[in-house]
Image (spheres, grey):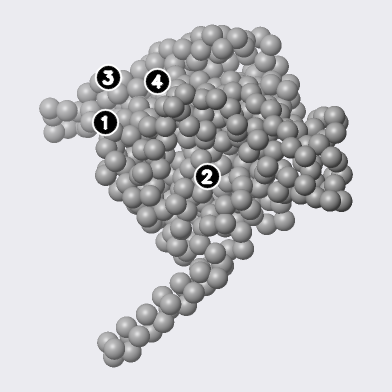
Amino acid sequence: MTLQNPVVSLDVGTSVIRVVIGEAKNGTIHIVGVGSAPSRGIKNGAIVDIEQTVMSIEEAVDKAEQMVGIKIQSVFVGISGNHIQLTSSHGVVAVANPDKEITEEDVERVINAAKVISIPPERTIIDVIPQQYIVDGLDGISDPRGMLGVRLEVEATIVTGSKTIVHNIRRCVEKAGLQVAHFVLSSMAGGTIALKKDERELGAILVDIGAGGANIAIFEKGNLVRTSVIPVGGAYLTQDIAYGLKTEMENAESVKIKHGCAMVSLADDEEVFKVHRLGTKKDSELNQEELASIIEPRLQEIFQLILKEVQKLGYTKDITAGFFITGGVANLKGLAELAEIEFDAPVQIVMPNYLGVKDSSFTSGVGIIKYVTDQGLIRLSKNSTASSKNINDQASGLLQKIKDWFKDFL
C-alpha cells in the first residue's frame, strides 16, 4: 500500500497498547490500519518493567504493519497521568519576512518564545497548545499564516510532565526500534474527535475511562483548561467480577466485555452465560442481571470519585454541554444512563467515526492522529513514518525476495 501522508499514533494503556495508522488527505484523515497487544510491564498507568513494555509495543506495531504493509519508523505518542500540569504562557516575536507576511517559520518562532518559562528541574515540556494568536493587537486568530503584520503573539498552554516518566516512555519506544515524533496530551487529542467545536466552547467534561484509571479533561471557551486522573478504572470492575464469580481474571474480563451491563434495572435476566469457577471442574450458569449486580456498585463509586474530582477542580453546574465518556469501559450497556443519574447532568458516550468498528477504546489513538494533522505537527516532524518512497522500495524488495525464494526452491 502506498500512503501519501502517513501518521502513526501509539497509545500506551494499562491493559492494552494500541497503534493506529492514518493518512491525511485533503484536510481529512483516513484510518488504514490498527494493531493492539496486551500491556505487559505497565501497572496503574506507570511503566514498571521496560523490557516487557517494549515487547508489547513491538507486538502492537508488528500487527499494524502487517495490516497495512509498511514499516513504521516513528510514532506520535499519547501521554497522560497525574504528573501532567498545564501552565499559561505568552510569546512575542517580530515578523521576519521583509514583506511582513507571516510564515510557518514565524509561527514556530513565537511558539518557541512561549516555551521560555521557568519550570522545576524534575519536569519537562511535553507540548505547547496555542489558544489564540495576536497580530498587531488583533486577537482571536486561530491561524496567522499568510496574514500581514509586524508583531506576532501567541497565548498558549504549556503542557509539562515528570521528566522521569517521559524518559521511561521514550526509552521504551526507542528500544522497540522507533522514534518519538512528538508527545501529545491524550486528553487534548481525544477532545478533538470526541467533542464538537460548540461543545468545547460552551464547556464540556471529557472522561476517558480505561483499565487503570479515568482521565478527566475540562474544556471551556474552546480550550482545554484543566486535567486530572482518577486511579480507578475498568480493571477494578474485572477484579470485582473475578472475586464475585470466583473465576480467573481472564474469564472475568471476557464476561465483562461480552455480557456486562452497568445497571441491574437494564440487564436482561434471560441473557445466560457460563463461567468456570475456581476449585471446580464444572462451569456455573449465570445471567446478565446477576453480573450487573456486581458491576453497578463499583461504577457508582467510580462516578462519584470523578464527580468529586471535577468539583475539586472548580467545575460542576457551569459546564453547559455536560459529560462525554469514552474509553474501553464506555462500551458497557447502560453506562450512560447510570452516569446521568450519578452526575445529575447530560451524558453522552463517544465513539470515533474514523474506524469501521465502533469502539470507544480507540478514541485516544485516533484523536492523536487528528490532533497532529490539525496542528501541522506532521510538517514539523520530517520522519513521522516511513516515506511513500521507502514504503514502495520495501514492498518491491519483499516481492523480489519472494520471487528469488521460489526460483531457488524450484
Instruction: Look at the image and tell me whether residue 384 can be seen.
Output: yes
In this picture, residue 2 sits left or right of residue 397: right
Label 3, label 1: how far apart the Cα atoms are:
11 Å
Q: Give the mark nearer the N terminus: 4 vs 2.
A: 2
User: x and y percent of residue 29 in the render?
Assistant: 64, 51
In which quadrant of the rendered view does residue 399 lie? bottom left
Which residue is at 51% across, 40% downward?
183
What's the residue type where badge 3 is placed?
Gly
In this picture, residue 19 sits left or right of residue 319: left
Which residue is at 31% across, 20% downward?
240
Which one is closest to the eye, mark 3 or mark 1? 1
Q: Give the mark nearer the N terminus: 3 vs 1.
A: 3
| Residue position marked by numbered label 1 in the rendering | 249
Which one is closest to the eye, mark 4 or mark 2? 2
User: x and y percent of residue 90 in the render?
Assistant: 69, 28
| Residue position marked by numbered label 2 in the rendering | 182
Instruction: Look at the image and tell me whether residue 216 can be seen.
Output: no
**On screen, residue 275 above or below 231:** below
Secondary structure state at the residue bearing disc 1: helix
Q: Pick the residue in front: 33 or 375.
A: 375
What's the residue type where badge 4 is placed?
Val
